[in-house]
Image: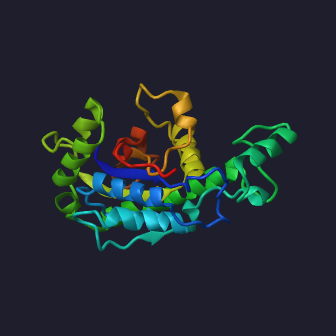
Amino acid sequence: MIFICIRYIYLNIIVPSLNTAGQGIDEPLSETGFKQAAAAGIFLKDVKFTHVFSSDLTRTKQTVHGILEKSKFCKDMTVKYDSRLRERKYGVAEGRPLSELRAMAKAAGEECPAFTPPGGETLDQLKRRGKDFFEFLCQLILKEAGQNEQFSQEAPSSCLESSLAEIFPLGKNCASTFNSDSGTPGLAASVLVVSHGAYIRSLLDYFLTDLKCSFPATLSRSELTSVSPNTGMTVFILNFEKGGKGRPTAQCVCVNLQGHLAGVNKTP
């Protein structure tokens, strides 16, 4: 059986504050946010991405720029901005303190994050939006791979695979996937997607419940449902049968990786 392997790296971008930013509050990054973006860029500098997607909100645009300007290979890469990657819409609660959102939920007899403020986006709506983008992206990569008859020779293979193994905590199963001597086909694409905390948490739920994604055994349920730190990294490896038939098999390498932030000073 022949598989096409796609690597996704999802970065979470949030505005470090005690407010609910959502979609309607399009704030820029803070000073700390810019430092974190630069730290993520340095961490990923040796990865040659084939595709870069981002939410079209200001904070994600600034983060993508901060990452790519540190890259050895992707400084001039075109970023595709997609509104489907925006943060969850919080309706009347956008821009208001998180304490008010929690109070609204309590008054409604519900708890966050399941509570949907008036005018906001339900978790099911958010999940469908994430699924829509994910399926679009998969079909795009599969179409491009199908159009390239010399794909296996031109794909970002040994260099990217070795850099992946060097910077991410791959287990033995993942490492063998990227072993150029194993006879396994190389990567069809290396995709960077920059989005937001609630959005990525919803996407993790889709990978877990719908795709039956394999997650690291050491990962607890609470870690899967927690909000990532700013520029936290979540990495997936997806395998498709040639022709893109059926659902992909998915393996998660790491969730909310944040080691690159160790040297980043936080502003008061």
Q: Which residue is outermost to the left?
A: 181
Residues 14 and 47: in front is 14
Give residue 76's position: percent from left, percent from top. Answer: 30, 74
User: Which x, y percent locates residue 120?
Assistant: 75, 56
From the image, which quarter does the N terminus lie in? top left
Residue 239, image x and y in percent? 36, 46
Left-right relation of 228 to 37:
right
Nearer to me, 122 or 18: 18
Image location (x, y in percent) of residue 72: 22, 63
Q: Residue at x 64, y 53 (%)?
A: 126
Residues 173 and 111: in front is 111
**In the rendered image, the vertical position of residue 52 relative to residue 88, given as above or below:** below
- Residue lying at 37% horizontally and 60% vertically, measured from the top left: 142
Q: Residue 84 sits in which quadrant? A: bottom right
Residue at image position (31%, 51%) is 4
> Relative to residue 132, is residue 140 drawn left or right?
left
